[in-house]
């Protein structure tokens, strides 16, 4: 069982609920703002370092609340309060997050950044999604969230064969 919390346990009562549930893993996702306002002019001083600081703070809060480290994962939140440039920089430097010592979950399937770069509608973003999934795994991501399971599994099997 896993909770993928887009608010990284910042909502009232969520930290206590997770702390009390000893078997549930929790994925701390980064989002700037709230879902309804997240894309209104997102700004970071340095997107990679800002997210690294965010995760270090949230992980400390979780550990201090008694959540075991082996229950925690992190998700940079591609597309959640980030521009295309922010998303590309996060992917390019994904190792910064994998080096924190927690599994990294990446969800880039059919994202708008693919559509904007390739000029493709959501129904034609498979190849861009696969490219980003392969890049993420090659940079240390452990979990890929996707819409296209069979194609992603094939691409990742080939990636693992090469990387081993």
Image (tube, rainbow, N blue to C red):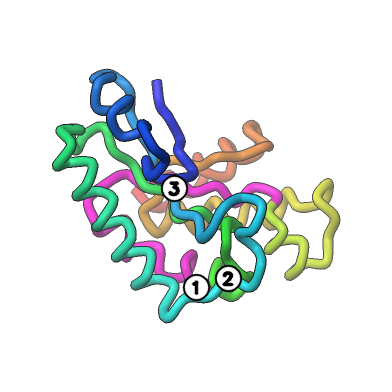
The answer to whether residue 106 is magenta is yes
Can you name the residue that lies furthest to the bottom here? 45
Nearer the camera: disc 3 or disc 1: 3
Question: At 66% from the left edge and 52% from the top edge, which residue is drawn?
Answer: 36
Left or right position of 126 against 10: right
Nearer the camera: disc 3 or disc 2: 2
Q: Tell me the crowding category of disc 2: few under 14, some 14 to 19, or many 20 or more residues within 10 angstroms, Cα based.
A: some
Image coordinates of residue 156 in percent, x first then y, are 51, 43
Separation (CA) of disc 3 from disc 2: 16 Å
Image coordinates of residue 90 in percent, x first then y, are 47, 67
The tag earlier along the polypeptide, 1 or 2, is: 2
Separation (CA) of disc 3 from disc 1: 17 Å
Depth order, front residue of 89/34: 34
Magenta residues (range)? 88-110
Image coordinates of residue 20 in percent, x first then y, are 25, 21
Task: Determine which residue is flagged by label 1.
Answer: 89
Instruction: Examine the rendered structure and indicate whether residue 62 appears above or below residue 34.
Output: above
Task: Determine which residue is flagged by label 2.
Answer: 42
The tag earlier along the polypeptide, 3 or 1, is: 3
Q: Tell me the crowding category of disc 1: few under 14, some 14 to 19, or many 20 or more residues within 10 angstroms, Cα based.
A: some
Q: Tell me the crowding category of disc 3: few under 14, some 14 to 19, or many 20 or more residues within 10 angstroms, Cα based.
A: many
């Amino acid at each position: 069982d896993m909770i993928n919390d887009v608010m990284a346990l910042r909502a009232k009562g969520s930290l206590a609920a997770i702390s009390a549930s000893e078997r549930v893993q929790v994925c701390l996702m980064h989002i700037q703002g709230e879902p309804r306002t997240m894309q209104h002019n997102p700004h970071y001083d340095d997107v990679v370092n800002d997210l690294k600081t965010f995760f270090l703070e949230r992980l400390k809060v979780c550990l201090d609340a008694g959540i075991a480290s082996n229950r925690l994962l992190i998700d940079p939140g591609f597309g959640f309060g980030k521009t295309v440039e922010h998303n590309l920089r996060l992917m390019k430097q994904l190792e910064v997050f994998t080096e924190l010592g927690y599994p990294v979950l990446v969800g880039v399937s059919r994202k708008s950044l693919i559509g904007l770069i390739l000029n493709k509608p959501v129904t034609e973003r498979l190849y861009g999604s696969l490219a980003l999934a392969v890049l993420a795994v090659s940079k240390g991501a452990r979990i890929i969230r996707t819409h296209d399971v069979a194609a992603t599994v094939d691409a990742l099997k080939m990636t693992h064969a090469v990387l081993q």
